[in-house]
Image: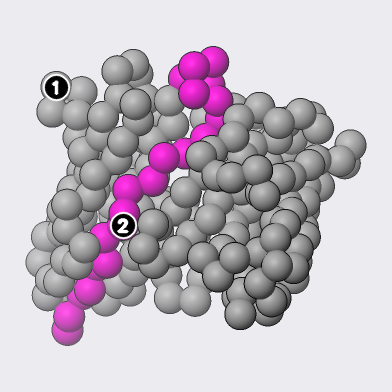
């Protein structure tokens, strides 16, 4: 079965502080992992995908297969980072079809 | 290029009625997926279509159905609406298998009264 766990419903940090949004997954094969962000009153947007290993808006995420984690990190939080963040997993299309399994989401609040 | 377009943005329906939601994917995208978003259950996969064929279906009752047209536009239908169907319904499109990520629409907010 595919499962994504985001243990924190809310993460509150001060501007300039480091941020780590946790994501753990359960999947027996090699997953595709994504982080999506939803700013207030905006649509869900793709932030990162593990396969591209990019850094977007200062955020990075490393896939740790041993710990089955894909935590999202940023060294210095900015107020405009305040949003809902979703971790999502896509398994083998042949086995699970073309779908995303989402975590429950973490609200990030950056205080000034 | 134009993003994923969902219509209508808002709907209010009565229990027992049926509803049809529409999604136009990004030009060139052939895969369209539907998700239900609620405060209690979060984002849940409904179904996915590729080249007019349903490739995958989530764990929803048969009242939820969909289809895809030859131009990749998709519709989903919910019959015999229940109060619990009130949700934000999101459509996402991708080019092939989603390895390049999925682009989401703004959603249709359905309220069942």
In this image, B61 relative to A85: left or right?
A: right
Please tell me which residue is depicted at 22% across the width and 73% down the height of the picture. Answer: A109
> Circle 2 — which element?
loop
Q: In which quadrant of the rendered image does the N terminus of chain B lie?
A: bottom right
Instruction: Give the numbered dot on residue A105.
Output: 2
Chain letter of disc 2?
Answer: A
Residue B18 appears in view: yes
> Is residue A111 magenta-colored?
yes
> Circle 1 — which element?
loop
Q: Position of residue A51 (x, y in %)?
A: 39, 29
Q: Which residue is mark 1?
A: A66
Residue A50 appears in view: no
Residue found farthest to the right: B70
**Separation of marks 1 and 2 at Cα, in angstroms:** 23 Å
Residue found farthest to the bottom: A112
> Is residue A35 magenta-colored?
no
Does label 2 lie on the same chain as label 1?
Answer: yes
Please tell me which residue is depicted at 65% across the width and 43% down the height of the picture. Answer: B62
Chain letter of disc 1?
Answer: A
| Residue stretch in magenta | A92-112
Q: Residues within 10 Å of mark 2 (few under 14, many from 20)?
A: many
Please tell me which residue is depicted at 81% across the width and 32% down the height of the picture. Answer: B52
Instruction: Give the numbered dot on residue B45.
Output: none
Q: Position of residue B100 (x, y in %)?
A: 54, 34
Give residue B29's quadrant in the image. top right
Most foreground residue, A2 or A71 = A2
Q: Position of residue B27 (x, y in %)?
A: 78, 45
1 vs 2, front mark: 2
Most foreground residue, A80 or A2 = A2
User: If you read the primary sequence from the N terminus, does the residue marked by circle 1 or circle 2 appear first?
Assistant: 1
Q: Position of residue B18 (x, y in %)?
A: 75, 63
């Amino acid at each position: 079965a595919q499962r994504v766990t985001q243990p924190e419903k809310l993460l509150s940090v001060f501007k300039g502080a480091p941020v780590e949004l946790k994501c753990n997954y359960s999947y027996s094969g090699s997953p595709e992992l994504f982080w999506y962000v939803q700013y207030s009153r905006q649509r869900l947007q793709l932030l990162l995908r593990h396969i591209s290993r990019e850094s977007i808006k200062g955020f990075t995420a490393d896939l740790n297969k041993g710990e089955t984690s894909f935590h999202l990190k940023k060294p210095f939080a900015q107020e405009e980072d305040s949003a809902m963040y979703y971790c999502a997993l896509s398994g083998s299309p042949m086995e699970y079809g073309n779908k995303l399994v989402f975590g429950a989401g973490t609200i990030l609040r950056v205080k000034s | 290029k134009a993003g994923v377009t969902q219509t209508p943005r808002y709907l209010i329906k009565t229990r027992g009625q049926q509803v049809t939601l529409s999604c136009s994917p990004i030009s060139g995208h052939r895969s369209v997926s539907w998700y239900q978003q609620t405060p209690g259950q979060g984002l849940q996969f409904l179904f996915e279509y590729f080249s007019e064929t349903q490739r995958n279906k989530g764990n929803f009752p048969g009242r939820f159905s969909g289809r895809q047209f030859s131009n990749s536009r998709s519709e989903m239908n919910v019959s015999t609406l229940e109060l619990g169907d009130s949700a934000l319904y999101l459509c996402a499109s991708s080019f092939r298998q989603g390895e390049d990520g999925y682009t989401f629409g703004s959603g249709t907010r359905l309220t069942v009264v």
